[in-house]
Image (cartoon, rainbow, N blue to C red):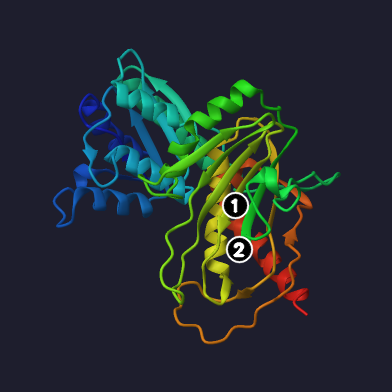
Amino acid sequence: MKIFISSVRTGLEAERDALPGLIRALGHEPVRFEDFSAQAVPSREACIKAVESSDAYLLLLGPHYGAVFPETGQSATEDEWVTAQRLGTPRFVLRKSGVDFDARQQAFEATLGDYGSGRFYKMFATVAEVLNAAAGAIHELEQAPGALEFEPLIRMPAIHWLTDGTGSQGFRSSDRPRLEVHIVPIEGSPLSSRILEQVLSGLPARVRSAGLVSMTEALDTAHEAAAIQLDASPPPTGGWNSVTSGSLASVRVLKDGQIAVAFRLPGDSMGTIVDAQDVTTRVASALRLTGQIDMTRAPKVAVGIGLTSRSMTAIGVAGQSNRTSASLSSRSEPVRVEPDESMSRAALDRGADEVAATLVRSLLRNFQSTEH
């Protein structure tokens, strides 16, 4: 494996210098910015590309957050973490004990959440301890079971689709069709109002870090009796025949732990475009976001996806301009893929792409089978 070592160097010099030798001795390839800082590209760009090409990600947490990039408002380390998280790269975190974290580093650590779903969290105080911790984490990663495990569902979970009681779930029948992704915990703990409030307070930062909205986009949040919800405004519209890109519409977390993520899909003046690749990317991003915010500790989940309506919707390729014709459906009923099996929590991390691709194939089959 190519293992990317991510951290601020200040305060962790000895640890960063010791880890490459260990990783090589274990038969893997270390990757760190010291080894490619002379490249003729910005250091941030080089680091992000290195994370994207790595097989695993090792985060060292020390006392300092590091310099902030103006374009992202984050340090290189946090940008690297977000990239690994977005890609579902296996991640493990080694935290230095006995040191005081600066305020920004404390805030960054708080966003990391727990370390399930293929992530490992270990403490160290000395160089010897960081080497032992890293060796243990790498061994766990080597011995990790397959990314996904599936089991048939004995009982179908109740999914709160957007078209069931639309007013309370931020969707109106006059809206264009939306893609909805529902993740239901199996045998998880219900969430108290206090826990929901904690989730809500960190939800905007998590949504931004996941790349689902820009760093400056305004987000609305609400805490209801049985749920919390985040809403993102639609992107500005262009001319009458302009092509609109898809965007995040809302994230909803219920007290029973069910999470719903809704997206606006690409479209133009002729209607909504269902692009298999685009929809797959959005479903995978919803699964990974759920992995970051889920607090139920459920060992398994069930996933359902759907389109809120077929009206003025066609299968096509997003981003193509000036469509002159399209085979559009005028029927208004939703198209859904109900879950029939549970899956391990790897579906919310390293297995997100595989799960998303399978679900979207079923969604398109259902769409086409009821087209006439």
Using the rendered image of the protein, determine whether residue 183 is visible from the camera's viewpoint: no
Dividing the picture into quarters, in which one does residue 368 lie? bottom right
Q: Nearer the viewer, residue 48 or 367?
A: 367
Q: Position of residue 345 (x, y in %)?
A: 63, 41
Amino acid on which disc 1 is placed: Ala
Count residues near mark 2 (Cα–Cα under 10 Å), then give few for <14, some for 14-19, many for 20+. some
Amino acid on which disc 2 is placed: Arg
- Residue labelled with disc 1: 262
Q: Is residue 155 left or right of residue 116?
A: right
Q: Is residue 204 left or right of residue 199?
A: left
Q: Position of residue 68 (x, y in %)?
A: 24, 37
**Residue located 63% across and 37% down the image:** 253
Q: Nearer the viewer, residue 17 or 267?
A: 267
Count residues near mark 1 (Cα–Cα under 10 Å), then give few for <14, some for 14-19, many for 20+. many
Q: Nearer the viewer, residue 60 or 337?
A: 337
Report how far apart the C-alphas of labels 2 and 1 lie in the structure. Answer: 12 Å
Q: Position of residue 108 (x, y in %)?
A: 37, 30
Q: What kind of element bears circle 1?
A: strand
- Residue labelled with disc 2: 176
